[in-house]
């Protein structure tokens, strides 16, 4: 016995020019989970270059609509990888660099990562990366200027963004085209 989606596949094979206007009612949570489970984990990346391991697929919650939905978020491994890259860039042996060059490097790393991972609910991942970058930049500035750690008085949160120009990732989510109402 054929399922609804199998029947649509048969109709599409019979008449490739046929247009299907409404098949959304055939997609259920169970069928999406089944399709997700059937993905090959080690398959090569698609045309957009995104692989299976870069996103976590699961249940998300929309505050605006007040209900849950199936969505993708950046995987924990990818968040840890960008945090590791930020840590590597702000090592102790790089304090000889100018602070504007260091902030420009961090901004380039963080903005590139945020542009890549901009689909789905990304606010939590952006907050983690942003907090890590602020902490690492503050530590780097304290080492550079021989200040005691944590250095909140000399390098407060506002000065990292306003004075040094560090990008604020959580603020970027409000500027995404689909975030506007």
Image (spheres, grey):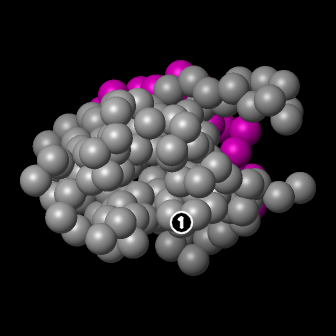
Residue range (magenta): 20-38
Q: Position of residue 119 (x, y in %)?
A: 55, 52
Nearer to the camera, 7 or 115:
115
Q: Is residue 23 left or right of residue 136?
A: right
Q: Residue at x 34, y 41 (%)?
A: 147
Q: Position of residue 133 (x, y in %)?
A: 40, 46
Q: Position of residue 175 (x, y in %)?
A: 72, 62
**Whether residue 89 is situated above or below residue 52 in the rendered picture:** below
- Indicate the quadrant containing the C terminus: top left, top right, bottom left or bottom right: bottom right
Residue 171 visible in the displayed image: yes
Number of residues whose C-alpha sits closer than 10 Å to that of mark 1, classed few (under 14), some (14–19) or many (20 or more): some
**Whether residue 143 is situated above or below residue 161 in the rendered picture:** above
Q: Is residue 89 left or right of residue 126?
A: left
Q: Main secondary structure of the magenta part?
A: helix
Q: Is residue 119 left or right of residue 68?
A: left
Residue 54 visible in the displayed image: no
Q: Position of residue 174 (x, y in %)?
A: 73, 54
Find disc 1 in the rendering and name its residue.
Answer: 165
Task: Single out the residue that lies furthest toward the left.
Answer: 93
Task: Single out the residue that lies furthest toward the bottom.
Answer: 17
Nearer to the camera, 65 or 30:
65
Give the structural element (helix, strand or loop) at label 1: loop
Q: Which quadrant of the figure has residue 178?
A: bottom right
């Amino acid at each position: 016995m054929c399922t609804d989606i199998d029947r649509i596949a048969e109709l599409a094979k019979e008449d490739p020019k046929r247009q299907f206007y409404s098949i959304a009612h055939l997609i259920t949570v169970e069928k999406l989970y089944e399709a997700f489970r059937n993905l090959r984990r080690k398959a090569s990346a698609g045309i957009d270059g995104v692989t299976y391991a870069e996103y976590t697929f699961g249940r998300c919650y929309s505050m605006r609509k007040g209900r849950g939905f199936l969505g993708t978020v950046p995987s924990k491994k990818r968040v840890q990888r960008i945090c590791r890259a930020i840590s590597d860039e702000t090592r102790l042996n790089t304090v000889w660099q100018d602070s504007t060059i260091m902030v420009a490097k961090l901004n380039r790393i963080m903005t590139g990562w945020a542009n890549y991972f901009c689909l789905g609910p990304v606010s939590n991942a952006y907050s983690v990366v942003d907090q890590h970058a602020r902490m690492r930049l503050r530590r780097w500035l304290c080492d550079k200027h021989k200040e005691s750690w944590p250095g909140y008085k000399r390098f407060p949160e506002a000065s990292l963004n306003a004075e040094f120009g560090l990008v604020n990732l959580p603020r970027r989510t409000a500027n995404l085209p689909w975030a506007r109402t």
